[in-house]
């Protein structure tokens, strides 16, 4: 009965097109609370390369042409679905913020299943703009699946209290500044992105006010950026940052650089980082060594990113996909691909889904954002991951002499890293 009621309300809202939406919501909220049904006013806005900003954006047939237009209407609970194509716009931010249980989503419809378009990249070409996405004072916003390039500063900026926001499954390249800048925004998750050929640091947690404590950089490939790979700044403290399961290579600065004020609670584990560590934080993790064996980052054209990006290939070399060598990033996590909801995406050139233990680094074709698929919520997930990492670290720090007695435990806690630790 409640369901029927709020379906009717939803239609009332939906047919009120052209009305000032936020004001309408307050009235609907009051009614919704009276009938104790879960509010269901969340709207979906569509953006397509062939769209028109004069339409209402509420269906693929009446899609907007610009992401900016959709963002100017979207807030908590709403989703902006963007079809394949190239959008020359930038500094995108939603008009409203999300809330717990009512996140605001920007979703790239790369396979065309929601817009009816032919599959393809969904590219925000931010040439002439400061940022690709600029999530500012907008908590609980998810940016999922976009290619973001050419911004004059950061590809994606999450700043000024945009806590609990998520950047997932994006390819962020050739921006002049950082790839992802998390600034004064706690509990932000940067999950399964390919971040490369940016002028600044790949992923940066920091700020000048509240800092960005509780930040998570999980499962990203961070390659060939102009400064550090992943960094936790030290102007103010960003505590309890977690950096795990990333592949980090060919960055000009340090692979992982944690400044002194941000050392408390830092957890770094299961990274394949060949670019070293900053001097202010002791290296506490037990990392994979050797080349990440990416298939061909520059591609045959020998140009990394920019106009040469279409043949850039960041899959992992592996025997099952026909390569003669196997990256140690394959099956590098102690957690299963299922545990991380990565079973519909791939690190293999043949596109076969990730199975058994999760592979490290960027997975092509992934759609899950780490927030939506898990019943207990992402905070629980991150807590489990940190706990496991700390146990692994503790066991590993005992040195090889303890391997005889604790190899089984070490294997359970650390995954394939156990064998490496014990030689
Ligand atoms: Ca290339
Ligand atoms: Ca695997």
Image (cartoon, helix red, strand yellow):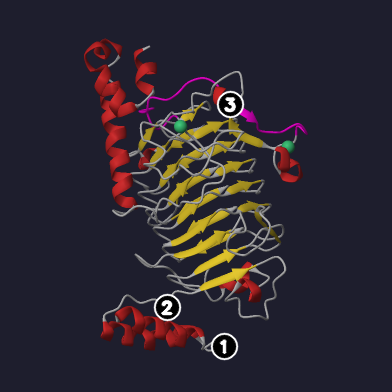
> Where's residue 384, x and y in %?
28, 41
| Dot placed on the residue nearer the N-terminal end, 2 or 3 | 2
Q: Quick check: 302 above or below 30?
A: above
| Res. 251 in view | no
The residue under label 3 is 317
Judge depth for marks 1 and 3 and give the one in front.
Answer: 3
The residue under label 2 is 41
Q: Quick check: 223 above or below 189?
A: above
- Tell me the CA gap for discs 2 and 1: 15 Å
Q: Quick check: 322 above or below 34?
A: above
Residue plotted at (41% across, 50% down): 370
Q: Which residues are magenta?
A: 279-302
Decide: few, some or many residues near mark 1? Use Cα within 10 Å; few <14, some 14-19, many ≥20.
few
The residue under label 1 is 18
Is residue 125 toward the left or the right of residue 38 in the image? right
Task: For mark 2, give the secondary structure.
Answer: loop
Judge depth for marks 2 and 1 and give the one in front.
Answer: 2
Is residue 59 toward the left or the right of residue 87 in the image? left
| Dot placed on the residue nearer the N-terminal end, 2 or 1 | 1
Residue plotted at (25% across, 23% down): 409
Decide: few, some or many residues near mark 3? Use Cα within 10 Å; few <14, some 14-19, many ≥20.
many
Residue plotted at (65% across, 40% down): 197
């Amino acid at each position: 009965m409640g369901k029927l009621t709020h379906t009717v309300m939803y239609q009332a809202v939906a047919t009120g097109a052209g009305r000032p939406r936020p004001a309408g919501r307050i009235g609907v909220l009051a009614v919704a609370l009276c009938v104790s049904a879960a509010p269901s006013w969340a709207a979906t806005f569509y953006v397509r390369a062939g769209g028109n900003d004069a339409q209402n954006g509420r269906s693929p047939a009446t899609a907007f042409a610009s992401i900016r237009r959709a963002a100017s209407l979207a807030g908590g609970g709403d989703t902006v679905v963007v079809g394949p194509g190239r959008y020359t716009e930038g500094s995108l931010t939603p008009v409203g913020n999300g809330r717990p249980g009512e996140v605001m989503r920007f979703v790239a419809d790369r396979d065309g299943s929601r817009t009816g378009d032919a599959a393809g990249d969904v590219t925000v070409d931010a040439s002439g703009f400061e940022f690709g996405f600029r999530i500012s004072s907008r908590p609980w916003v998810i940016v999922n699946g976009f290619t973001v390039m050419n911004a004059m500063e950061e590809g994606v900026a999450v700043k000024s209290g945009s806590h609990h926001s998520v950047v997932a499954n994006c390819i962020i390249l050739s921006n002049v500044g950082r790839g992802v800048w998390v600034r004064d925004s706690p509990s932000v998750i940067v999950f399964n992105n390919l971040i490369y050929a940016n002028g600044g640091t790949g992923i940066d947690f920091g700020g000048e006010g509240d800092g960005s404590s509780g930040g998570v950089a999980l499962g990203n490939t961070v390659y060939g950026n102009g400064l550090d790979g992943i960094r936790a700044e030290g102007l103010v403290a960003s505590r309890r940052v977690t950096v795990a399961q990333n592949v980090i290579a060919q960055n000009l600065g340090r692979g992982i650089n944690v400044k002194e004020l941000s050392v408390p609670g830092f957890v770094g584990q299961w990274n394949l980082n060949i670019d070293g560590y900053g001097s202010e934080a002791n290296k506490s993790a037990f990392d994979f060594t050797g080349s990440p064996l990416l298939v061909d980052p520059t591609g045959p054209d020998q140009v990394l990113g920019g106009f040469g990006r279409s043949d850039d290939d960041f899959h992992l070399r592996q025997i099952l996909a026909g390569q003669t060598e196997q990256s140690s990033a394959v099956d590098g996590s102690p957690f299963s691909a299922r545990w991380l909801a990565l079973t519909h995406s791939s690190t293999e050139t043949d596109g076969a889904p990730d199975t058994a233990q999760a592979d490290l680094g960027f997975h092509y074709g992934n759609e899950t954002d780490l927030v939506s698929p898990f019943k207990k919520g992402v905070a629980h997930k991150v807590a489990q991951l940190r706990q496991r990492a700390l146990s692994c670290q503790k066991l590993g720090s005992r040195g090889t002499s303890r391997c005889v007695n604790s190899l089984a435990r070490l294997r359970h806690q650390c995954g394939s890293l156990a064998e490496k630790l014990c030689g």
